[in-house]
Image: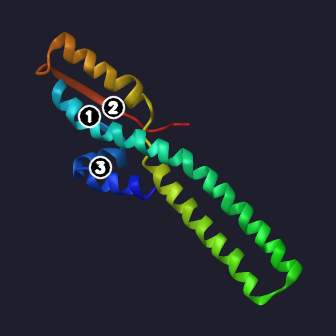
Amino acid sequence: MADAKKFYRSLTLHEKRFIDDKTMSTTMSVKNWIAFLSRASSYDAYRDKMASGSGLFIALGVIATIGSTIAYSEFEIPWVIAIPVISAGITAWLIMRQSTLKSRDLNNYLRLFFMPFLRMMEDFAGPEAKLSAAVDFRDVF
C-alpha cells in the first residue's frame, strides 16, 4: 500500500484533483486527454491491485487478534496482552489505509472503455482533434 501512496504523491496536482473528485468537464485535444488520463488510469490499475491484496492481510490480522485474545484469556500471562493489542493496532491501521485507497478508486470504465475510446478517436480523428467531454468515474454502487 505504501507503493500506491508513493505513486499518488508522484501525480500532478490536476491528476490528484481528478482522482479525488472523479469528475471533469472540459474541451481539449484527444492527445491531451490521453496524456492527462494515462497516469490516472495507471494509478487506478495499481490501486486496484494493491487493494485486492490487502484484504488477505486484514483478514489475517482479525484472526490473529481474536486468536491471541483467546490465548490471553486462557493463560492470563500479563505480557501476552501485547500480542492482541499490537495485532489489533496493525489491523486497524490496515483498514484505515484500505479506506483511503477505496476513496481514491476510479470506476473501471476509465480503463476499460474511455481510454480505448480515446485511442480509437486518436486513430480516426487525429491527435489534434478537439473533444468536449464531461466524465464522471465515481462508483455509484
Residue at 55 percent across and 44 percent down: it is 52
Q: Amino acid at mark 3?
A: Arg
Q: Would you say 88 lies left or right of 105 here? A: right
The residue furthest bottom is 78
User: What residue is at 57 percent from the left and 60 percent from the top?
Assistant: 95
Residue 29 visible to the viewer: no
Residue type, mark 1 in image: Ser
Q: Under tag 1, what secondary structure? A: strand
**Among numbered discs 2 and 3, the one appearing first in the sequence:** 3
Q: Is residue 77 left or right of residue 120?
A: right
At 51% from the left and 37% from the top, the residue drawn is: 140
Q: Earlier in the sequence, mark 1 or mark 2?
A: 1
Q: Amino acid at mark 2?
A: Val
Q: Is residue 109 left or right of residue 84?
A: left
Res 39 → quadrant: top left
Indicate which disc residue 25 carries: 1
Q: x, y (%) of residue 23?
A: 34, 39
- How crowded pointer 1 is (Cα within 10 Å; few <14, some 14-19, many 20+) is rated as few
Residue placed at 63% from the left, 57% from the top?
Answer: 58
Q: Residue 85 falls in which quadrant of the image?
A: bottom right
Query: Alpha-carbon distance for marks 1 and 2?
Result: 6 Å
Q: Outermost residue toward the left?
A: 128
Label disc, if present, on residue 135 of the rendered structure: 2
Residue situated in front as seen by the camera: 67 or 14: 67
Q: Tell how many labels.
A: 3
Q: Quadrant of the C terminus?
A: top right
Checking the image for residue 17, the label placed there is 3
The image shows residue 98, relative to residue 92, as above or below, that is: above
Q: Secondary structure at mark 3?
A: helix
